[in-house]
Amino acid sequence: MRRLALIASCLALPTLLACADDGGVGSDTNADEVGSDTTASADEVGESTASAGETSASDVSTSDTSSTSDTSSSGTTDATDTTDTTGDGDGDPVANLTFVAFGDAGEGSPEQYAVANAVEMVCADKDCAFVLYLGDNFYDDGVASAMDDQFQTKFELPYADLDLPFKVVLGNHDYGLLSFAWEKSAYEIEYTNYSSKWELPSEYYGMAYPGVDLFVLDTTQFMWDHDTGTQQNWINQQIAASSATWKIAAAHHPYYSNGEHGNAGNYEGLPFPPQLAGDTVKDVLDESICGKVDLYLCGHDHNRQWVKPTCQGTDLIVSGGGAKTTDFAYHAGGNEVWWEDDSKPGFLLVQITGNTMHTEFYDSDGVMEFERDITK
């Protein structure tokens, strides 16, 4: 019983307890290929969809590139709020979108400021449309109201010089220290009314851009099997209604990860108790995300990694280095990777043009460390 209590504490309090085991291996695999120019134009939406059709991620082929120098790309952005529909009413336009993604940033630390500065520098060249903010927005206990000072010290001030909207994902710490204070999400949703950058219309929601649909999930609810059926039905309806060339899902918890939290269904490297192991997270992702979207983005583990295994053809990226790092744990030997790093904070850049999705990993100094393409 004492060991089960420790397991529960490690999952609920990841910043207070070190649960990771050192050792194991991941494999670095790099090739040589270049990126592509991207322009970003967006129509952003709320919680319902109006388009029909579906593209399976199993039809996607991939290639990867590793480089120490930057591959430039340019474009313009026009992110405009419109209607409550995900998908494009005029069919399937040519995909054009550039954004950055990182999570686990809610510290107010020098490292958070460093990542913010690096994003500002990179996006000045890349013309990013937005930041996809992958959860754990306020360590360690979330916020106590929409007027909580942490909105200033851990969000507005660190990103004061970054002129981009933040599309916000909820993480376990956003629901408090024990991750089930469900009332806390309302405070982060309400803050959307008071900020020019913070955008969180609901716990889970959709966004539509030319040729690209994004689905933001709340996996902390899945961890506790909290109203799972309602959210999963929403996911199924959203994806089925999408005719976009590219479909991307974003959430906080990983499907596969070499970090201390590890793989869904085996979180912390242990298959029990089922709830804390992430069984419901795995079940929902298996049924509703894997093979139905092209890319699944998450945080939770405080490092950056693109694992080689997919879930039914869906590529999996962890970008949880927004303010700090934790060492890889490689539970059960770990997962093979295209690339990974646990030595520095950083972020992911995604550039989509037509049938190519180009990605680049940057560190907190703005150094591009790895790039890889997915091509349909």
Image (cartoon, helix red, strand yellow):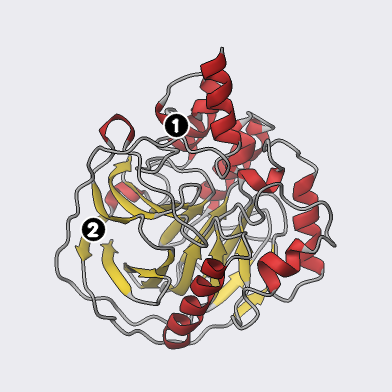
Earlier-in-chain disc, 1 versus 2:
2
Asked whether residue 82 is in view, the answer is no
Crowding near pointer 2: few (<14 within 10 Å), some, many (20+)? few
Please name the residue shown 46% across and 59% down the image. 321
| Mark carried by residue 373 | none
Quadrant, the N terminus:
top right
Specify the amino acid type for callout 2.
Thr
Please name the residue shown 46% across and 47% down the image. 301
Instruction: Report the front residue among 59 and 149.
Output: 149
> 87 above or below 235?
below
On screen, residue 114 versus residue 201, left or right, reads: left
Asked whether residue 299 is in view, the answer is yes
Specify the amino acid type for callout 1.
Glu
Instruction: Report the front residue among 209 and 321.
Output: 321
Instruction: Find residue 65 and report its horizontal and vertical position in percent.
Output: 20, 67
The residue pinned by badge 2 equals 62
Instruction: Find residue 157 and report its horizontal and vertical position in percent.
Output: 68, 75
Element type at marker 1?
A: helix
Instruction: Find residue 260 and report its horizontal and vertical position in percent.
Output: 42, 40
The residue pinned by badge 1 equals 268
